[in-house]
Amino acid sequence: MLRSPRALLLDFGGVLADAPPQPPAPPELVRRLSQLVGGVVADQQIAADLTEGARRYSAWRDGAGRTADPVELSHSRVWAEFVTGSWPGPARDAVDREATPLSYAWTWRADWAVRPGIPEALRAATAAGLPLAVVSNTLCGAAHRDFLAAVGLAGSFAAQLYSDEAGPRKPNPRLALLAADAVGVPIDRCWFVGDTLGRDVEGARRAGAGAAILMRSPRTDREPPQPAVVPDARIEDGHGLLALLRQARGSVD
């Protein structure tokens, strides 16, 4: 049985919420960029560059995750390095000035949905006196904040730590350590709940978390095998998390 936690640190995507894959070049974002640059870059080129940019940014994230202490790129650098590099100077400058709202739009998912059992698990943890924190890699944490507020879950969290705001990217242990500091609980008394071995479980191990819990999501199933990274428990959703808490604490209901 796992040692009872004094706080929970939870990933956003794949744990708190999830959504079907989104096309890397959403039509509304293509239109917004086209208007922003005054039509000097064709819509077809914008869509192609967004698609290729998403692929390259994903490859960068994967590569960064294999380094010792990965750090998130700024919004401006993501657009400049992965999307607009071949665009005319005025168009690049226009995107740079709007890099943060554009990053929000690229991050936001209209079909995000709270994962099954998560509201119940969060309510039970809060009732048991466990402070909660979000710990997430993302291009734009503001989009995640707004979603949690829209579905009535933002008030459950004492802190929300996002890579674009805080700097470190999982598996950099600093992001989890910052979250533990924010909730005032030693990291070795925190459970870390994520949906990837390489970023979440590995990051939790590096940080010294009391337990590393792997919640299965579509991303989990796509991840390459990592036999050297072993979670303390595997669960399917928020109902599984609540069951683990009940086992560990006895009084959680």
Image (tube, helix red, strand yellow):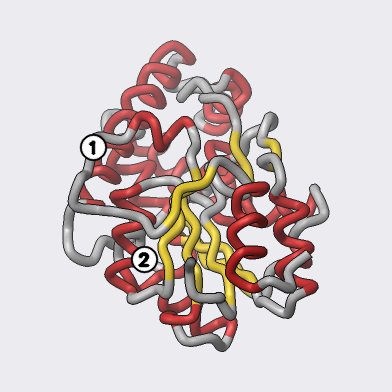
Tell whether 45 sits left or right of 103: left
Would you name the residue on which mark 1 appears?
A: 225
Classify residue 188 by image quadrant.
bottom left
In the image, 247 versus 225, the foreground residue is: 247
Q: Residue at 44% of width from left, 18% of height from top?
A: 47
Residue located at (53% from left, 86% from top): 185
In the image, residue 31 above or below residue 237: above
x%, y% of residue 66?
18, 52
Residue at the location (70% across, 50% down)? 118
> Could you give the CA–CA distance between mark 2 and mark 1, rounded to whole angstroms?
18 Å
Identify the amino acid type marked 2: Ala
Q: Is residue 190 above or below residue 87?
A: below
Question: Disc 2 on helix, strand or loop?
Answer: helix
Q: Which residue is nearer to you in this view: 19 or 248? A: 248
Picture coordinates of residue 253, whole percent (x, y): 78, 64
- Residue at 36 percent across and 55 percent down: it is 231
How many marks are shown on the rendered structure? 2
> Which residue type carries mark 1?
Pro
Eyeballing the image, is 148 above or below 113? Answer: below
Residue position marked by numbered label 2 in the rendering: 204
Q: Nearer the viewer, residue 96 or 202?
A: 202
**Where residue 111 sits in the image (x, y, percent)?**
68, 29
Q: Earlier in the sequence, mark 2 or mark 1?
A: 2
Horizontal relation, residue 72 to residue 98: left or right? left
Q: Secondary structure at mark 1?
A: loop
